[in-house]
Structure formats: structure tokens, C-alpha cells
Amino acid sequence: MESSDTAKRQHWMAVLARASRTHLATLMADFSDYPAPEIVRPAETGTVMAEGRAGGTGARFNIGEVTATRCVVRVDGRLGFSYALGRDRAKAELAATLDALLQNPERQEALLTKIITPLAQEEKEARELASRKAAATKVDFFTLIRGDE
């Protein structure tokens, strides 16, 4: 896989991991012409260690464990993987199926246009709205210096 292909796949896997199951299922309703996925590794829930960075850019540190679900399926001979926070096994299977379908060059463009792009746009808009709401509550603290001291 070329690095541009790898970057594309990383992008769609990240978008799928952050999307809700209802969004994925709704958008997938238009794509019913694919074969049923063969379950290679059934969806299973466990914990993974989450890392943070001091100040967002500093040294890494362990925040704690979070619940995650993973799944591996095969569709059209291609393996699809998914990792997602939470316990939603159906979402993990659906995301893994989409990952496998997106690896098929014949289906990729349609799936990127109809599923990944709208999900990424919704995510971007939600992030911007949250940022605007946070900015609206920002308080600037300053000190007045009195002239007699």
C-alpha cells in the first residue's frame, strides 16, 4: 500500500471509529449490493490504555483504561478492521465491513462520497460548534495598576 493509500485508509477508519452506529447504518442503507461479511474475528470488547499529553503537546502520560471494541471481517476477499471506543459490537462489525468495502477500488469512490465525506463534514461542524461555544464563555483576566502605588 502506498503512503497516500495508507493515509486515505487511516482517515476513513478514524471517521468510522468516531461515527455513531445509527449514522453508519443509515448511510449504509443505500449500499445493499455487497456480499454478507464473513466474520474473521467476532466483535469483542476489552480495555486499552489511553494516553494524553501535558498541555496537548508535552510529554505523554497514561490517563487510564478505556473500553474499546474491535472486529475483523472479510468481504470480497478483503479484510476489514475496526476499533471503536465503547461496547457497541454491531457498530464495530459495520465499521469493519465498511473498511473492507472501501478497500475495493470499484466501490471506493462511491463509498467515500456517500458515507465518509458526509460523516467527516458532520464531525467537523460539530467540532467547530463546540469550539465556538467554548470561545463564547472565555474570560480574560487582567490586572489594573493603580496610579498611586
Image (cartoon, grey):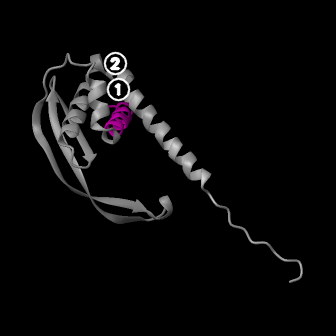
Where residue 17 sits in the image (x, y, percent)?
A: 31, 41
Q: Which mark is residue 28?
A: none
Q: Quadrant of residue 21?
A: top left
Residue type for callout 2: Ala
Q: Quadrant of the N terminus?
A: top left
Q: Which mark is residue 110?
A: 2
- Label 2 Cα neighbours within 10 Å, binned few <14 / some 14-19 / many ≥20: few
- The answer to which of marks 2 and 1 sits earlier in the sequence is 2
Q: Nearer the viewer, residue 50 or 125?
A: 125
Span highlighted in magenta in the image? 1-16
Where residue 33 sits in the image (x, y, percent)?
A: 20, 16
For disc 1, the marked residue is: 115
Where residue 60 sits in the image (x, y, percent)?
A: 40, 63
Residue at (10% x, 36% y) in the render = 40
Q: Residue furthest bottom?
A: 149
Q: Quadrant of residue 4?
A: top left
Residue type for callout 1: Ile
Q: Secondary structure at mark 1?
A: helix
Q: Relative to residue 126, is residue 135 drawn left or right? A: right
Tell me the mark number nearer the camera, choosing from 2 and 1.
1
Where residue 123 sits in the image (x, y, percent)?
A: 43, 38
Is residue 9 rendered magenta in the image?
yes
- Label 1 Cα neighbours within 10 Å, binned few <14 / some 14-19 / many ≥20: many
Is residue 121 rendered magenta in the image?
no
Marks 2/1 in contact by CB < 8 Å: the verdict is no
Mark count:
2
Which secondary structure type mostly characterizes the magenta part of the structure?
Answer: helix
Q: Nearer the viewer, residue 107 or 66?
A: 66
Residue at (34% x, 18% y) in the render = 110
Residue at (14% x, 20% y) in the render = 35
Q: Quadrant of the C terminus?
A: bottom right
